[in-house]
Image (cartoon, coloured by chain):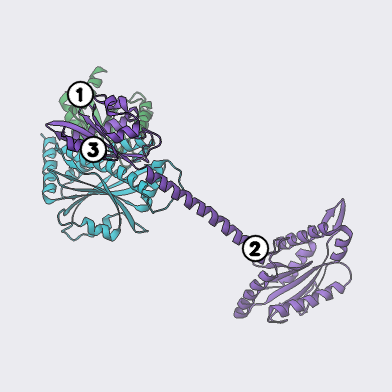
Amino acid sequence: MSEDSLRNDILKEIFNISVGKAAGLLSEIINRTIILTVPQVDVLNINEEIQLEDYLPKVTDGALMVSSISFHDILKGKANLIFPAHKMRTFINLCMNENNENDDTTFTDIDYDIIKEIGNIILNSIVGEVGNFLDIRLDYSLPEVKVFTQLNLKKNLENKEYPHILILYITFIIDETEIEGVILVNLTLNSLNELMKNLDRIEKKLYE
Amino acid sequence: MNKIPYNLLNEISEGIIVLNEKLEIFFWNYYMGILTGVQEEEVLNKDVFQVLPNLNVPYFHKTIHDVVDKGHKMFFSAAMHKELVNINKNYNLNLKASGFINDGERYLLLEFIDVTNQFIQINRLKDYVNELRQVNKELIEKEKTIRDLAYYDQLTGLANRTLFYDLAEKCLEIANRNHIVLCLMFLDIDKFKNINDNFGHKVGDKVIQKVADLLSEVTKEDEIVARYGGDEFLILMPNLTNYGHEELIAKIFNNKNKSIFHEGQEIKISFSIGVSFYPVDGTSIDKLITVADHAMYVAKAKEGEDNCYCNSCELCTICQ
Amino acid sequence: MKILVVDDSVFSQKITCNLMKGLLTDTEFIVAGDGEEGLEKYKAIQPDYLFVDLLMPKIDGKELIRLVKEIDSTAKIIVISADVQKNVREELEKADILAFINKPLNEDKAKLISALIKGE
């Protein structure tokens, strides 16, 4: 997406703000400071020859946890928060403040609920902030949580209905532990166009 | 309000609250009554934060406003919000919030979902797993103890005969393949019976321990020290170079710790050492031990203290 | 009057400048894209006010503020950041900054800042 770096810059800034808000909320809930790092954004099209695996988090034990919400109305798509399973375990331990030596990557129902909540906070913030900037209101679903292998996830995300993918790389640092994850937003073609149209509109206004 | 859905909401095993835009209680179902002990009549039209003061925290306010203003759906897990949603400490509750419009008015739906059983079950499982871990740990420790008993001498901690034979076989194999010279020493404590008789078995044990420590101290990592029996020890040097056995014997004889003190008296310890070599004196461990044993008796027969005898080593300076 | 805006987002730089230009006449706006550039330009230009973003590559906002305060302890600094955590804010306010504004910057917030500046 290097054709228009200002577009990319605007997207990055939108994500920056939304991740900041999400971290703010999360830090209040778990009562710890969260250090953020500079996010990075890419826009992909699965119709072009790309290897989606290259963009997904690397996992040694093969399991990825995905929390996702759907949104629709003027923009239609799905937002996915993807963490490697063992990183998710670390995240949960930190949020629960349990000093857990548990590094078990089998997750209980309680763990799933926690992941649902974290996913909801982060994804709502991101999609919400995009809505804010574009001055539109969207309809949201409640989050779903699933475990995937890298291959299954790739298949799941390569959805012909939503060929356009925004990828956002985020890193949270809680108590000196780095938690790296990926946020993937699938958009329909119309939605991507709508998004780009609005980004251009914002860009134009800057120079008025 | 339509009677049929109203009754339905009172049948559900979920706490349901409906708020108006001003966050005042519009509806409070039967199950909320069970969760809180408070019935609808008492709370109708009251501000929800007055009725459920635990919700009065900044992040809840922020999230609720996002639900009203932006149409977000909110989910708070029981695990992360023990104080927030625990109206009653006996329950673990997940909280969902969403907005809806009825007759042009905005309303807020709060659902309190009881997951207490999940928590109980999972905690039981966790306890069970911890118990298993503990039992497993103990089993492993017991196994180790049994293994140790089988292979190690209780008094000194040195390898016993069984372990020695095991290790020695391996060393012989390696020596055979690589054409190396091995050296076996048979070490006997002089007049040990006298020490036992004169000073008692406790002192005798102390002497054995002292000797074991001494031998461990002067030998290298790859050299094997074992207690062969009563006051007999074996030392295997798996790769003999340059009269290394002379050096070792000298170290043993000259060691400062070669005595113990008992009731103010110094009891000196003296050794007789017999030495055999592989492959010259034999190609099996039994043969080597036999030869070294005989050599030890030759050494014992010599005059004075600290004697050694090598069966085949003609060039030895120590044991002539 | 000279104002230096340090932010790694060109978009954010422009928004800040555009909003503030409308309210503060006769002011020159200079921009820098990261903490390092920000420090250099600060030394060279010696602006009246410094607007800083926290999350930047190379030298981040917090570090830049520390270095600027070493040069001039009375430096007038306004933080405009996406990081909205209370502890972060409290820590920075100890460093004696003029204001801590949460992104995104809008007209209301800009008016607040201009009032602060004019009131000085």
Mark 3 vs mark 2, CA separation in Å: 67 Å
Give the letter of the chain under mark 1: C
Give the letter of the chain under mark 2: B
- Chain C takes which shade in the image? green
Q: Are marks 3 and 2 on the same chain?
A: yes
Three-letter code, disc 2: Asp
Provide the secondary structure element on which disc 3 rests: helix
* Image coords of residue A119 (percent x, y): 29, 44
Relative placement, left or right, of B169 versus C81 is right
* Image coords of residue B193 (percent x, y): 86, 65
The answer to whether residue B110 of the structure is visible from this angle is yes
The residue labelled by disc 3 is B9
Q: Are marks 1 and 2 on the same chain?
A: no
Three-letter code, disc 1: Lys
C115 to C6, vertically: above or below: above
Which chain is displayed in cyan in the rendered image? Answer: A
The residue labelled by disc 1 is C111
Which chain is displayed in purple in the rendered image? Answer: B
Provide the secondary structure element on which disc 2 rests: helix
**Few, some or many C-alpha atoms within 10 Å of disc 3 (few <14, some 14-19, many ≥20)?**
some
**Labels 3 & 2 near each other (Cβ < 8 A):** no
Three-letter code, disc 3: Leu
Nearer-N-terminus badge (3/2): 3
* Image coords of residue B46 (percent x, y): 26, 24
Mark 1 vs mark 2, CA separation in Å: 80 Å
The residue labelled by disc 2 is B148
Provide the secondary structure element on which disc 1 rests: helix
